[in-house]
Image: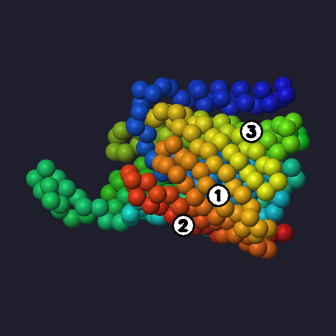
Amino acid sequence: MKRLILVVSIVMLIGNSAYGSDNGAGTSVAPFLKLGASAKSAGIGGVSVAICEGVDGIWSNPALLANIELREVLFMRHQWLEEVNFNYLAAVLPLKNQGIGASINLISTGDQKRTTYSNPDGNGSFKTGGMVLTAGYGREINNQIQVGASAKYINQKLDDKTGTGIGVDIGSLYQTQIDGLVVGVVVQNIGISKITFIEKEEKLPLIIKAGAGYRIKNTLMGIDISKPNDNSVQFNLGGQYQITPIIDIRAGYDSSVGITAGFGISHQNLTLDGSYLLTDEVGSTFRLSASKKFR
């Protein structure tokens, strides 16, 4: 228990040192860093800190990489809003009591109308987008505690202007004395360097998250509570039920977007995950991912 307190304290102190207050609400750059890269997690209301598995740990919580048992690759396609596309590719490799992984996330939009004061109806078009390269590492401290860290290279483009920066995630997991109950903490997007557009520096959207997951028989339930540095406290909750040995159904609630639903189909180390979100504010969005495990 003393080791757990030490791990969590270190993670929270690092987060608080980079954190600040709510005074910077809405000021962070690279907002796509706030969107998860797991179709499974998205279907369970965005819960991710303690319930994601395998390759999903690269983005959700690097401590999860300590638990991988097989090599795995994943590709995800995410249609956000009408013209914002995410293409995500990731892979992990298990080692003895530890694991490593890497991913690339490409974000692109369609043509946006360029407007000016003198021509409010539009004068040509421009594009926006971004890229995130991530490398992660997780290791097992003992049978109950896992820790991990990942580094991110972030590139964001707005028309002909480009900004780059480097961020770090640090996370931990604790397998409690209660069978099936796991808790975790992760600090995401700690800014090693800020992103600079022209001459102005912009901070990354640092997020502190705490979460728990509980598995009993064919049911998995989870909850996350998070605090972004540019917004109020948010929460995610949801669950998954295995209706057959190869089919899972999912549902949840994400306080930042709304109700979610999803599914998972697995057969011979091949998994297809999908998630769906419908809100009045942004309309419907859909994520679909395919992953393959190798011995």
Q: Is residue 39 above or below residue 267?
A: above
Element at badge 1?
A: strand
Dot label at residue 250: 1
Assess disc 2: are there few (<14), some (14-19) or many (≥20) residues with their C-alpha within 10 Å of its C-alpha: many
Q: Are marks 2 and 1 in contact (CB under 8 Å)?
A: no
What amino acid is found at the position of numbered circle 1 in the picture? Arg
Q: Is 2 drawn above or below residue 116 in the view shown?
A: above
Q: Can the viewer see residue 62?
A: no
Q: Which residue is mark 2?
A: 77
Residue 289 figure quarter? bottom right
**Amino acid type at mark 3:** Val
**Residue 241 percent coordinates (x, y):** 72, 58
User: Which is in the foreground here, disc 2 or disc 1?
Assistant: 1
Provide the residue designation for mark 3: 183
Which residue is depicted at the point 59% across and 43% down? Answer: 236
Which of marks 1 and 3 precedes in the sequence? 3
Quadrant including the C terminus: bottom right
**Of residues 155 and 295, which is closer to you in this image?**
295
Q: Is 11 positioned to the left or the right of 20 in the image?
A: right
Give the Cα distance between marks 2 and 1: 19 Å
